[in-house]
Image: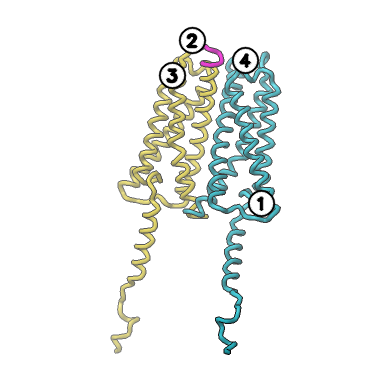
Chain colours: A yellow, B cyan
Amino acid sequence: MNVSRPAVHPVEAPPLTDGDAQILQRVRMKDIQGMPGTPGGLALRLLQLAFAIAALVVMISTSDFTSVTAFCYLVAATILQGTWSLLLAGVDIYAILVRRSLRNHFVVCFFTVGDGITAILTFAAASASAGITVLIGNDLNRCAENNCASFETATAMAFLSWFAVSPSFLFNFWTMASRRG
Amino acid sequence: MNVSRPAVHPVEAPPLTDGDAQILQRVRMKDIQGMPGTPGGLALRLLQLAFAIAALVVMISTSDFTSVTAFCYLVAATILQGTWSLLLAGVDIYAILVRRSLRNHFVVCFFTVGDGITAILTFAAASASAGITVLIGNDLNRCAENNCASFETATAMAFLSWFAVSPSFLFNFWTMASRRG
């Protein structure tokens, strides 16, 4: 029996392990802060959530927001934005705790579409509210009989929430494009 | 004299030409319709321009748009959008005529930033105008004494212009990301 035949011996495969390590290193290198599953991404989600809640609370604290459609729309948009950001913050916390990279193509695609939709809705609501607030305050000069300060604060908070969503959307879109491009 | 020495003879370099052809083919394969320098991209620019001009003309045809800040802002935003789209349509026509690929990194980066800014401004103007139009029409029921139809048309045109800008922005951003990612 020829025991020195290489095919009979169980051999280890060091090149494969090296390859894995290289791939792992390359993925790690592309983990920019702000992407889903990173502490930066979690911080963005918490900011979105905080500003959306602030806009919502300030707007519903005014008694007459229901008389203006744009303000009702702002309330609806901030509820949607807050829910989405809360869910994604949960996903980020999970990913950070179990040290899992959220780089699955479908996951990134889903996050991108969701971020895009919520960002557009929040921005539209903020812009519409800003238009109404400026109309009441500057064009009609009726701030005395309206809660201009509250409307302005809620609008500003909605804009800040949108500012925090935009990087999430761009990071996700970037990840999607650089994987498939 | 040794005439058969290869270094003395002027030799052609077929491998380089092959490489060029390969690069050219790879770039051509990624030329999706809608990207700058393609007929699809030019069509998008012309749509943006047409809708921006339509929104502008309809809005300034109303006599009382100056009394509402949001409508003045819509006029300014559509002028900016129209100018930008006109310039880029010119660049696209030039690129198509001389068959030049607009894939320089700085050019793509410039187009992406410009598209992003004009898209955001146009969308904000359209949303603010929509908020005011809904306020006048539905909340206050004062369409009889206002040009509701014109305001609504101008708002719709501005939204359509934004719809045409968004693909341009996304295509450019995608190109940027897939090159650098």
Distance of label 2 from label 1 (alpha carbons): 57 Å
Tell me if residue B137 comes above or below residue B76 in the rendering.
above
Please rate how many residues cluster around mark 1, counting C-alpha atoms within 10 Å: few if below 14, some from 14 to 19, many from 20: some
Tell me if residue A35 comes above or below residue A8 in the rendering.
above
Give the number of the mark in front: 3 or 4. 3
Disc 4 element: loop
Residue where numbered disc 1 is placed = B95
Q: Position of residue B120 (x, y in %)?
A: 54, 35
Between residue B12 and residue B20, name the one nearer to us: B12
Distance of label 3 from label 1 (alpha carbons): 51 Å
Q: Which mark is residue A145?
A: 2
Q: Is residue B88 left or right of residue A102?
A: right
User: The disc numbered 3 marks a residue on which chain?
Assistant: A
Give the number of the mark in front: 2 or 1. 1
Residue type at numbered disc 2: Glu
Distance of label 2 from label 4 (alpha carbons): 20 Å
The reply to whether dot 2 and dot 1 touch (C-beta < 8 Å) is: no
User: What residue range appears in magenta?
Assistant: A137-144
Residue where numbered disc 4 is placed = B141
Distance of label 4 from label 1 (alpha carbons): 50 Å
Q: Let me know if residue B181 is in the magenta part.
A: no
